[in-house]
Image: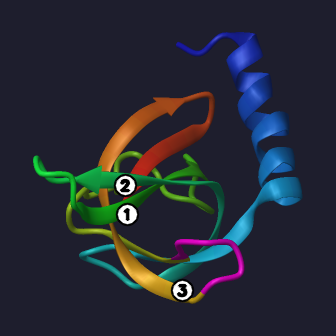
Amino acid sequence: MPTRFEQHLRRTVVPNLVRQFGESAEYFPCNGESRAIEVLVIRDPLSIASEVGEVLVNALVVRVKNASDGITADELDTGGDKLLIALRSGGDTSLRSIVQLLSDANGFLRLLVQ
């Protein structure tokens, strides 16, 4: 059972953070209809390299509300769901896979997207 602090955080802090620092993205669940959501993107792209050092893919860490107007943890399908998002701020958007749920805490899902 969530504490009163956790309930207050989910109800007030999460929406305000997304409103102030969020950006639009399009969520494509593997078994449903796409929808627009607001996300917080960490713009330090992770470079996933092979054993010999060549960059195989760039990845992002994305935070999204764990709610019906974001993505609920119950509906998330890592490996199947996708986000239409830009690798760099102001750059061209492209369809990227949600490959891992990094954490589910304090009203946010933290996702590894590549």
Give the mark nearest the N terminus, 2 or 3.
Answer: 2
Within 10 Å of the Cα at label 1, are there few (<14), some (14-19), or many (20+) other Cα atoms?
A: some
The x and y percentages for residue 58 are 37, 63
| Disc 3 secondary structure class | strand
Amino acid on which disc 2 is placed? Ser
Residue drawn at 29 percent across, 47 percent down = 100
10 Å crowding of disc 2: few (<14), some (14-19), many (20+):
some
Residue at x 57%, y 58% (from the top left corner): 68
- Residue 93 x, y percent position in the rendering: 54, 86
Front in this rendered view, residue 105 or 32: 105
The residue at 75%/61% (across/down) is 22
Farthest front residue in view: 52
Side (left or right) of 107 relative to 76:
right
Along the horizontal axis of the image, is 76 left or right of 61?
A: left
Residue 87, given in percent of the width and then of the height, sits at: 53, 72
**Label 1 belongs to which residue?**
58
Q: For the residue marked with disc 1, what is the amino acid?
A: Asn
Q: In front here: 34 or 56?
A: 56
Of 78 and 112, the residue lying toward us = 112
User: What label sits on residue 47 in the rendered view?
Assistant: 2
From the viewer's perspective, is 86 left or right of 30? right
Q: Quadrant of the C terminus?
A: bottom left
Prevailing secondary structure of the magenta residues: loop
* Image: magenta residue range: 86-91
In the figure, 22 relative to 23: above or below? above
